[in-house]
Amino acid sequence: MTTLTYPLSRIEGHARVVIDIHDNEVFRADFQAMEMRGFSHYVRGVPAEQITVIVPRICGVCSTAHQVASVKALEDVFGVVPPPLAEDIREVLLLGQLIQNQATSLFIFTMPDRVNASSLFELSRSEAGKARAFSLAQMALRIRKIGTDLISLAGGQFIHPIKTVIGGVTSGIPRVKADQLILTIEELLPVATDLLDIYWDLSMQMVDRIGSWGDDEPTHYLASTEANNYRLNSRRLRVMKPDGSEAPSFDPHEFEAYLQITESEYSYAGISSYLGHIMRANSLARVNLAESFGTPLADAYRERFVETFGKPAHAIMFFDLCRGIELVYALEKARQMLSGDLEHGETEIGYTPRDGTGFGLVEAPRGPLIHRYEVENGLIKSADFVIPTVHNMLAIRRALTVVAKRYVSHEGIDAELERAVGRVVRAFDPCIACATK
Amino acid sequence: MESSTDLPKFAVLQLSGCSGCEVSLLNSEEWINNFQLVYMPLVVTSNKIPNGVEVLLVTGGVRTDEDIHNLRKGRSRARKLIAVGTCALSGGVAQFKKNHIARESFLKASHRLRMPDMLPNAYPIDKFVEVDLYLPGCPPTPQLFMTALKDPEHAQIAPIVCQECGRKKLNDMRPKSITGSRSGVVLPDICLVNQGYVCLGTSTRGGCGALCTRPGHACVGCRGPANPYLNKEPKFVLDNLRRVFSRMTDIPAEEIDAALASPWLSLFLGQFTDYTQETDLPPRTKEKML
């Protein structure tokens, strides 16, 4: 038995791919999370109202999603409904996170793969990079920074934000600050579409070279965005079947009836299935489950995507293109929301703590995220974090098996396998800190 | 960027943490033109830290035996090592302290085949290697990262958060009990302690620009104790906080003590002061603290 081990870079956290080969045949391909954050253990006994400061630290990349999900779960326990203005400001916050995350995944994590560069900075210095009128690296980081600026504005600080509290948000967004950010978005939106066009072209060229968009077997898709409303501050989970039809939607408090989560012997991350089926979450799931974005540029890209690749589209590297479309959507939507009045009106309402069990759902960049807390005598008795990356584990494993079989033959192991493994994992944009909560 | 190979080599080693420090570093993009990034798995495909690294940033705490191995290897290849963020300085939120239930529950769940073994606790990195500079914060701001990389010797760091906050301390506004998160409105321009919030800004080192307290969020102390409390027992910083609250408020001492012991504050406050309880660690001088 030959065991190939590939440590991974350009993803969040510590993980590796292990492929077992015997007699030029692939036996097993696995994706293993090498660290354990363990928050579900050490929040036990913590006063419930303090948990919203602690759980963002599960992950610095996804801290916004965790903060909002934890606040929503406690609001569910306490029976609080925040005012509409607070819901809108939370949406702006989550749009900021989507911009930051998709820009990072597109430009820092996966764009170098399009030209076999080791990093965005090397790519910028390459022929493909020098041919541009601007520095790819600096522009990509500027787009990404709009996301962190939005999180700072709506969340108080851009990592481990603080403004979302039980009952609402602590303050509105002043007109002057909203206007400043609108100007930046207007200046950089054309840059973002240019970067997406470059990314799209480089992806097409890469696929011409390697001959595949990756595992394209039809599968189930999971998202909590609506067909005609891409709201990330979401309420219900939706499922698309492999044939493109929709299964019944469900509430976060029903998740255990649909999502089966088990531990793995070889990885610190769990594995989940939808009623025993392989499923996928993240950008491609959302785009497959959407009819429209409701913003013109993103809708134009979506139409181009559907015309070119169909609906539902199944190949894994479509996740990357969909992230690009979502980046454009989030910039357009943020501009639209900031144009409205987010300054005046009730941002927060009072509440009375009580014991019970509550669920908080948001659509994180990687898919639906649920926090479940059981509160007893004001303390956290048990906490459960249902993590989007975990929903993709079976799909990642299958896609790795597909790619391993492609590059292992009677002629031996093709040197392209190492790069191919990286492309497969990055298409899912896994987050290991979250997955090992 | 053309001649980047002439620039000093710069590397980022992430141990067990949340990547928040890396995300913050990416927001201070100026380093792109000043350094050659040779190792940072989040951003660059590179399997090992090369020799001759000028500056190595280490983020995350030591959680596994593999972390210790990687940390020692990194130290041997770098001229200057900077410990970055709460986890590298104290073990971070993954540090269990005296929570035995959590510790046992965690360790029981942490057995896997062919995976790094978890240590009994999460440790600060200076338990294992020499550190040249400490950069506390959860995470440090992009500005602090730039200061650490460019000219840490001449940095002017505000001694405490209050100095950068700008909220006024009043003599005639004395709350009688702690204001919970429930009461809602925070008055602008007035000290959060005057408003009954358990704000740790009076004892926490500055340099963060008071980015939490200015918009009205009590300081949780993520930058750790101010210089007078470095390398001192926890009681010194706690006593100072008690003095501040008895001078500025009429909140009963027991109520303040209970609040200071609560998990969201002990998250940072407790862990930095607990550091001094580890007897085998080198002292952290103020010259080495950014």
Image (spheres, coloured by chain):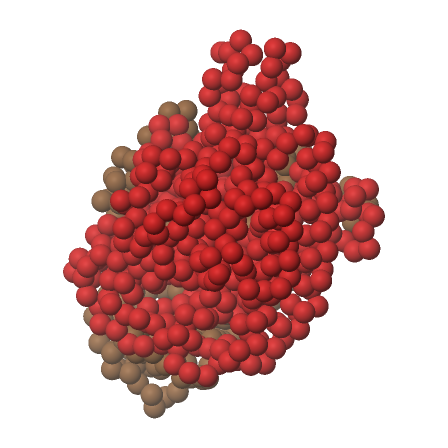
Figure chain in red: A
Position of the C terminus of chain A by quadrant: top left
Image point (25%, 82%), residue name: B176
Q: Quadrant of residue B61?
A: top left
- B274, A5: nearer the viewer: A5
Q: Is residue B55 above or below residue A189?
A: above
- A104, A328: nearer the viewer: A328
Figure chain in brown: B
Image point (68%, 52%), residue name: A196
Q: Is residue A366 above or below residue A113?
A: below
- A340, B280: nearer the viewer: A340
Residue A418: percent from left, percent from top: 61, 27
In the drawing, does residue B213 fall left or right of residue A110? left
**Can residue A268 be seen in the rendering of this structure?**
no
**Can residue B260 be seen in the rendering of this structure?**
yes
Residue A141: percent from left, percent from top: 66, 56
Image point (62%, 17%), residue name: A413
Q: Is residue B177 above or below residue B266?
A: below
In the drawing, does residue B180 fall left or right of residue B141? left
Residue A264: percent from left, percent from top: 36, 31
